[in-house]
Image: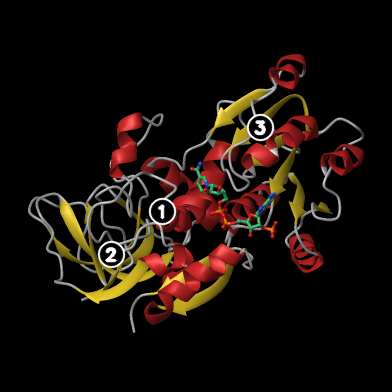
Amino acid sequence: MKAVVIRNQGKGVEAWKLVERPEPKPGPGQVLLRVRAASLNYRDYMIAKGVYAGPLGQDIVPLADGAGEIVALGEGVHQWKVGDRVASTYFQTWQDGPMRPEYFDHQLGAKSNDGVLAEYAVLSENGVVRIPDYLSFEEAATLPCAALTAYTAIFESAEHFRPGGSILVQGTGGVSLFAAQLARAHGLRVLATTSSAAKAARLKELGAEVVVNYRDVPEWQTEILRATNGEGVDQVLEVGGGGTLKRSFEAVKFGGLVSVIGLLTGVGPEVDPLPILFKALHVEGVIVGSRHAFQRMNRALERFQIHPIVDEVFPLSRASDALAKLERGAHFGKIVIRVDS
Ligand SMILES: NC(=O)c1ccc[n+]([C@@H]2O[C@H](COP(=O)([O-])OP(=O)(O)OC[C@H]3O[C@@H](n4cnc5c(N)ncnc54)[C@H](OP(=O)(O)O)[C@@H]3O)[C@@H](O)[C@H]2O)c1
């Protein structure tokens, strides 16, 4: 079968190699997935650069997010049948309840775990979820990480979202756009930051009420405060990291929630505890989500007929070009690789 492997970790876009390798076989409790499409996350670029999830096993297949159909069942598998349309779960062992540290060892496309950028992938029978009928494979392949992270941050937090409340998303990557779509569908007010006028216009089309260009307005939090009568938003989905966290603490309202998700600007100087204390903020780290949360999210997507925003679909032969586009930050939404020819 055709597969991409990470052969030169640390080389970024040049780390991926398209190779031929034997088709894997499912063992007991596993299924064989005929992968139709896979999608990229920022972490896949970080893994290729060698700055995330530590050293890899030999020739690991990248990407955690894929969709396709089940073509073979391992011994003892009864919950699936051949032909079922499914997507992978990012953590193969996290079924429900809170995140536990041991799940990190079972993430796809990292450590010694092959991911899904191959024609076939062996997955745990409990490491896949059924995909809604109305979604194409390309669309469903975008769900396992970015969409679920956005869903978990908004709907699975102990600080449950407030109907009619407001949410700030940063940039127009996968997590932020899913958050904007889910929030709008549930009647929340969406405010956003982005880097260009063209992307700002598309955010407005998606229903973002206020969009601030953080290149033109580096202190964008002042605009967010202005747009919320000086109060701030109920929730910030923080994907910026060290370069944005302080501004997010300013942009959120008293008693609000800052969901810490990403590190696009890297890690920062020490965190100032003062705004957390004096604004009685809730600060919560969010890590993707469980398989059951994925199923709950799929019901929400189906109910509102939400279609993921796919920026571009690349063929498998151009997988490295897809990674290069992610590196440039030129995308709006998800970058997908079509795996079948
Ligand atoms: N904790 C988790 O479980 C989890 C899950 C998924 C992702 N993440 C993390 O969340 C972050 C976003 O992931 P993603 O997959 O959505 O990324 P992505 O699709 O690659 O999107 C990145 C986008 O963020 C925007 N951006 C870049 N620098 C920015 C800045 N300084 N301030 C605001 N926006 C900025 C850019 O959009 P504009 O040009 O519009 O600004 C860029 O296109 C990454 O750090 C990723 O590792 C964490």
The numbered dot on residue 336 is none
Q: Which residue is mark 1?
A: 47
Q: Residue at x 67, y 47 (%)?
A: 183
Amino acid found under the numbered disc labelled 3: Val
> Residue 266: which quarter of the image?
top right
Mark 1, secondary structure of its residue: helix
Q: Which residue is mark 3?
A: 258
Mark 1 and mark 2: Cα distance apart in space = 30 Å
Name the residue nearer the viewer: 127 or 216. 216
Mark 3 within 8 Å of ligand 1, using the beta carbon: no
The numbered dot on residue 84 is 2
Q: Residue at x 73, y 35 (%)?
A: 248
Q: Is residue 309 visible?
A: no
- What's the image's color scheme? secondary structure
- Judge left or right: residue 69 versus residue 48: left
Name the residue nearer the viewer: 67 or 187. 67
Name the residue nearer the viewer: 75 or 150. 150
> Residue 224: which quarter of the image?
top right
Of the residues under marks 1 and 2, which one precedes in the sequence? 1
The quarter of the rendered structure image containing the C terminus is bottom left
Q: Residue at x 61, y 57 (%)?
A: 173
